[in-house]
Amino acid sequence: MWVVVAAVCLPFVCRAVEAGWAPSVPCLWRSTFGMACPGCGLTRSVCALMRGSVLDALRWHPLGPFCVAVLWVVSAAAVAERVAPAVRSRISDLIDAVLRPATALGLAGVFVAVWISRIMLGASGVRWFRW
């Protein structure tokens, strides 16, 4: 149910961070290595998506909309599991598939691939992505 709480609170947290009501957490990777991490811009991407700006969300981080979609799907599955016990086994199979180590490694690989492509595009002079 924590996923559902996170999905419900997400728009409010984004608004609080953007308005300066809540402090944003500095990136440990950037502080240590002086360069953007694979997730840099992801929070701002999610916040832009919550405002309805899909293009800005993609510019901040291309995987932001994907992360929001996954959060909503998992939240809907968690609620459906509580409301409709008849579909419990199907939803449990879906959640188990998402939580498999191979899936997690694949998603980490996608994040690293996007990160490397953003770095290479930035190094070649393409300034489409925001950091």
Image (cartoon, rainbow, N blue to C red):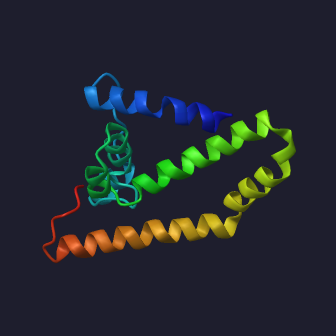
52 or 28: nearer the viewer: 52
Point out the image quarter for the N terminus. Answer: top right
Picture quadrant where residue 127 is located: bottom left
x then y, percent, for residue 107:
54, 65
| Residue occupying image coordinates x 27% and y 70% | 119
Instruction: Report the number of discs.
Output: 0
Query: In the orientation shown, which residue stands out farthest toward the left?
Result: 125
Is 34 located above or below residue 115 in the figure?
above
* Residue at the image position 22 percent from the left and 56 percent from the top: 130
* Viewer-nearest residue: 120 or 9: 9
Residue 72, image x, y percentages: 56, 44
Q: Position of residue 93 (x, y in %)?
A: 79, 57
56 lies left or right of 32: left
Residue 55, given in percent of the width and then of the height, sits at 27, 54
Residue that extends furthest to the top in the rendered view of this protein: 21
Asked if 58 appears above or below 49 in the picture, the reply is below
- Name which residue lies at 60% across and 48% down: 73
Q: Quadrant of residue 52?
A: top left
Describe residue 63's horizontal placement relative to residue 21 as left or right: right
Q: Which of 105 and 7 lies nearest the eye of the viewer?
A: 7
Which image quarter is the C terminus in? bottom left
Say which residue appears at 19% left-offset and 64% top-offset.
Answer: 128
